[in-house]
Image: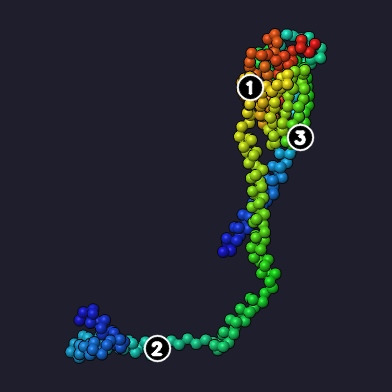
Amino acid sequence: MTGFWQRAVVVTTALFIWTAAVIPAVAGVKDDQVKLRAQLIWGTNDEKSPNPDHKDLNPELRKKLSGVFKWKNYFEVKNQEMAVPGKGTKRVRLSNQCEVEVKNLGSGMISAKLFGEGKLLVEQRQNFTLKEPLVLGGHDKNKTAWFVVLSPM
Amino acid sequence: MNTNEELKLQAYADGELSPREAAKVAALIERDGEARALFTELKRTKDLLAANEPEILLPESREFHWSKIAREIERHESRPAMVRRFASPAWWLKYFSPVAATALIAAMVIIYPNITDNESDAQTAPAPETSSVVFRSQSEGMTVVWLQGDENYEFANPESDL
């Protein structure tokens, strides 16, 4: 009988400590805000952009895009930082026609909605704990391309 | 003399036979020398054991022996209630067990949606009239959603901005 009580005490104590440690940790992750950078990028084979407001893309992201897509040059049209609170939603306009909405699903998961001319075009979920960018893209005018890149910060 | 007769002789020596059977065995002893010799041996052994049975005596009187037991019981019963309460682990287990169980259930409720969320790192729900291709570039470490369709959106084209 003594052995039974000793085991019961040990198991109950371990269970209590585990739950006491896990609940705040999990709850903390869920409530954490997600910080990310939303960029609208133009991909072209031209050497220069006719728009002087377009900026050269940072080399790291440029290398990533060049590793997957065929365009020679990539210009940054818009760069917007976003902080989405736990279970919250933020929407930003990246150009006259393009908007992106990010919902924080908790635990590092986000849901991104891309709107074109106010219409929902695509919705994508991404695990930002992987620290990898999510790239939404499509063909643009004159054999160019647009990219909306959401990068965790 | 067979085994049955030997057993009857032993029973006769112990006085366990009915008068009729006892008479039969007595007659057997009278006429059979072997039976007589066995009966004599059994009787002698019985008398020897009865005469030499050890007598164990308590080194103290009966009353004193039981009074010691009674005092020991009283001593255990008179221990402070608090001491007994804290000596047993059950007093706090009955509080902590439900608390721990409740905490565990709460943890599972919180964890379970996260587990289901993490089952798929990325999911796509294309809007109607739009198709898309999703792929992950292992070498570049990024997920790409490429929109396809007859309509090209001029999101980034400089001519649209100007």
Identify the residue shown where x is 63% and y is 58%. A9
Above or below B56: residue A79: above
Above or below A23: residue B18: below
Is the same chain shared between marks 1 and 2?
Answer: yes
Q: Position of residue A4 (x, y in %)?
A: 57, 60
Q: Find the distance from the CA under tag 3 to the CA under tag 2.
A: 98 Å
Amino acid found under the numbered disc labelled 3: Pro
Which residue in the structure is indicated by mark 1?
B128
The 10 Å Cα crowd at callout 1, few under 14, some 14 to 19, many 20 or more, is: few
Q: Position of residue B162 (x, y in %)?
A: 80, 11
Identify the residue shown where x is 64% and y is 76%. B77
Foreground pick, B146 / A88: A88
Quadrant of residue A6 in the image?
Answer: bottom right
Amino acid found under the numbered disc labelled 2: Asn
Q: Chain of mark 2?
A: B
Which residue in the structure is indicated by mark 2?
B52
